[in-house]
Structures are given as C-alpha cells and as structure tokens.
Amino acid sequence: MKRDPGLYDYLPYHRRPRIEWPGGARLAFWVAPNIEFYELDPPKNPTRTAWARPVPDVLNYSYRDYGNRAGFWRMVEAMDRCGMRGSVSLNVAVCDHHPEVIQACVQRGWELYSHGTYNTRYLFEMSEAQERALIQDSIDAVRKHSGQKLDGWLAPALTYTERTLDLVAEMGLTYVCDLFHDDQPGPVKVRDGRLASIPYSLEMNDVIAYNINLVSPRRYGDIIRRQFDRLYAEGADSGTVMCIPLHPYLIGQPYRIKAFEDALAYITGHDKVWLATGREIAGYFLDHYYDAFAAASQPVHDL
Amino acid sequence: MISDDYLKYPKRRYGMDHELYDWSILPRRSPVKWPGGARVALWITVALEWFPLDMKGQPFKPPGALQTAYPDLRHYTLRDYGNRVGIFRVMKALERHGIRAGAAVNGAVASRYPALIYECRNKGWEIVAHGLDMDHLHYEGMADEKALIERTLRHLPTVRGWLSPAKSESRLTLELLAEAGIEYVCDWVNDDMPYRMKRLYSMPHSSDIDDYAILVNNHHDEDEFRNQLCDQFDVLHEESQSQGGRILSISLHPWVIGQPYRIGALESALAHIMRHPGVWPATGAEILDAWKTQAGSEHLL
C-alpha cells in the first residue's frame, strides 16, 4: 500500500496562475445530480456490505427508489425554473432500468458522466481487467443512450483501486470528481494522458448534509449560500468552482425542495457566474490552464 | 479477489430488479381526485409501541430501542410515557381539527392496554397492525413468521393495514401478510401515493416526516419540526394544483411529540395545514378506498 496516493503535486492556493472563466465569470457553477440504482440483493463483496440492515433492507432500498419514482422529477422542475443544467453522476444501469429518467436528462441537454454501473457494485480489490470492463461498460452505455462521449468519472459509492484514475484517463475520459483537495480544477498525475480533477465537494453534497450531518432543509439552503458567497468573492482574484452534488431521493423530498430551489435561484441570479457542466469546466481548464498549473506545482518528497 | 461473476448483472433490465412491484413515475400517472375536490389528504399515523425490558434487538435495534445494560428502566419508561400521557395530548391536538388518525399498534399494546385501543376506536381512529412488539422484527431466516403474524393479528382483529416494526420485512412478509388478509403495507418509502404491489397495496407512510427522525435522530428543535411539516405540506398543496391529489403523511410517536414542550409544534403545524382549503383529513383505509376508485383498473388488484 502507498502512503500517498501520488495523484497530485503541491500547489498553494494563493500562488497559482490566474484563472479567468468564459465571459469574465468569477465562478464556474455546476450541479451534479447522482442518479443511482441500488440493487435489492446485490452479490456479496468482501470489502463492504451494501445495506445497513439484512437483505431485504426495505426501508433503505425503497428510500433510494423514491429518487427515481418521485424525487428526480421534482428536482428537474426546480432546476428548470432556475435555468440550471445538470451533470449527471450516473449509475449506468439506470439506462436499462429507467430509460425515461435518462431521456428527461438528455432532452434538457444535461451531461451524463459515470458513477459506475450500480451503486451496489464496488471497485475495491478488482483486477485491472475487471476494472477496465466496468469503465468500458460506462463508455458504451452513455454513448448508446445519449450519443455523448463519456468524459467524467465519480467512482461508484466512492470505491477505488490504486489504478482507477490511470485507467479512466487511458480510456479517454477527461475529468474526475473523486478528489476533494481543492476549490479549483487541477492536473491529476496519471500513467498516460491528461486528466483534470474538478471540484465536486462532499461538504455541499446532500448525502453528507442530510444523512451524516443531519441538517434541516432550510439550514442546507443557508450552507449553500455561504459557500457561494465566499467562493464568488474569491473568484474576483482567480476563478473558482462550486459544485452542488445532489441525490434525488434526498433533495426531491417535498419538504426539502423549496429551500434548495431558493438557494439555487440565489446563485443563478448573480452575474459573473458561469452556469456550466462538468465537461465544460474540464474542457476549459484542460485547454487553458492545465499546463500552467502542472508547471507551477511543486513535487512532494516524502520522508 | 473479486470473482468475474461480480460483473454479471442478471437483473439489469427495464423496470425494477425484483418482482414485488412495477416501476412507475409519479408525475406521469393519471391525476387522482379526492372526495369533495380536496387537494391534499392528511394522513396521520400515531405509533403505539411497546419495547420489552428484556429486549434483544435482533437482527438490529429498531429506532427507539432500549440502550443500557439490563434493566434499562430509563428508556423503557420514557417509551411507555407515550402510551400513558403523550397519546392523549396528541388526541386532543387532532380532535381540535376533527382529524382522525391511524394508530399503528403493537399486538402487545393491544393486549396490555385495552383501554387505549378502546379510546382510539371510540374516536373513529383506524387501527393498523404494527407487529407484535418492538422486539419482534421481521427478517430473512427468522423462525416461523407466519405464526408471528397470526399471533399479532389475534390481538388486532379486523385490521386492513400493516406497519412492520422498524419497517422490517423478510422476503416472505408481503406474501404472508396478503395471505393473512392484510390489504395494505406501510413499510415502503419510495412513493408519495399508494401503489399496487403483487398481492396488496403500498401506502406512503413517511420515514422523513416523522417526529422521531426530526426531533430525536436529527436533533432539530420544535420550530424546525413545525417548519418541516409546513414546508412538506406547502409543496404538496401547490403540486396538487397541476398533478392531482396528494397525501401529506405524518408519522408520530407519542413519547416524542407528546412531551409538553413539543406538542405545541404539532398544534402549530396543524393550524397552518388546516387553514388551507382542500385538506381532507382521513385514515389510511379511507384514502386507499378513495384512491382505488380512481383512474381505472391499473390501481386494482
């Protein structure tokens, strides 16, 4: 095992090439709904169990199913009203189980990127061939169901091997959401190719807010506003990125949707905010800043 | 080492990965009309529960389980407070608006406190079966589930609805409940409306709009509890204008909401809700009956 993931060099926040987003925007803003399928009775994995309770975990399974049946549709309407596109972190099996959900995303010009096949199939301890097969499945499914080239990656249930990001880059993806070390994009050191890390944020993630930190819906709206205010102010010096990762089973609950929509409207109501997708932010960064950021970064020497 | 079978997906297909119910999109269904042109059916479920002092907590501890070494008098008695005191505050708060609730009753509560069940029936509340007690969960591999369900229903005759303790089910539970004559279950939280399962109906009993979840688990205060109930109602009420009848499902535990300092939050939320036109307070069975008459045969078993 490694002591350091070896995925990025050190680059202090205040000494970096200055980022200017398109149109002079201070902040690149993106929303990443996680559209997921959790299996009722997934195969056993040696590294973790899928459900908190014995199978069938009716409560937790049905809670997630709510996202696709009900929550997604409410979330989509709220985002439509704010003129916000989504960049979907997709368990690609949803293309087969719920094509109507995929169609609703594609019709709106939303991006689909990969969040693995199912949220109940984990990468831990996979062989390279297995991992390649799983990534290829995502590339094929996204192309088949949306016509899009797969560009982004967020590992299913945040599970990895040491080589996951190397393979993702080698197989033609351009960005990952798995690293939480920064408020700006950055180069990822992979075996081959150029891969960007795009800030995704666990702090803004509704799963962390609601299931771990147990905040109230109105408090979540307040958290989003505070995060935005600071990143927007700092973006006057050099462009920042803000992401809100969502889960329709949580944010699409009636008692949560209004406070979220109000916070979203607050952000989209500002000028100098680039309402972007993950792919667009990664593309712009790779074209304009990747090389300068890589050159400015300082290699890390372990003890 | 991960077996190559781990990358095979035999249930990757259109719809669900099981046969228990069909995939269905809430906003694409025919709009439902409630009696009298109501927009939101108000369905309150009050859990009347008993946690045995010698609780084993198998295969997992249900919400509200006893916690200390035996004998855990502090948690046992606080839960029982709900059945002695808290429930009567809840009844009074509901009665003010003419709201009849569903009481989700452990078989043990019916046996131990018949006077409480009498009060519920007397007020026109619906009795819903809530398992034998809070230490009899339903799970895969449990011993003789059929006998447990029969034993529970002996204490709760004529019920139409079932809420498993902690929403726990084995793979057989739905089948066994249907065989025992149960018409609807309240364990599944994947919808805002009733839907048809294989041999019975699912009713949208909430795990979120729940006093234990908000006040005890999430540590939110009473004002927040009130806000969350009101926000849930406001969105459903607005949605009903374009999408047809909706259900505001509220789940209560008298040992939680029935505390003197908390009951006012429920009263305040109910005052907000009942001020609106088009609110139909009803029991689960009444809501299900109204729903079943709607929009054709896709609803009927």
Image: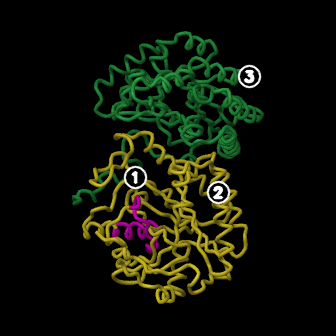
Q: Residue at x 68, y 59 (%)?
A: A263
Q: Is residue B73 visible?
A: yes
**Residue A116 or residue A145, whichever sits in front:** A116
* Front position among marks 3 and 1: 3
Q: Position of residue A268 (x, y in %)?
A: 69, 67
Q: Position of residue B100 (x, y in %)?
A: 64, 22
Q: Circle 1 is placed at which residue position?
A: B14
Q: Residue at x 48, y 44 (%)?
A: A63
Q: Is residue B281 left or right of residue B10?
A: right
Q: x, y (%) of residue A17?
A: 57, 87
Q: Nearer the viewer, residue A59 or B223?
A: B223
In the structure shown, which secondary structural element does the residue marked by tag 2 occupy? Answer: helix
Residue with the mark numbered 2 = A78
Disc 2 vs disc 3: Cβ atoms closer than 8 Å?
A: no
Q: Main secondary structure of the magenta part?
A: helix
**Badge count:** 3
> Which subunit holds the residue at mark 2?
A
Q: Is residue A177 magenta?
A: no
Marking on residue A176: none
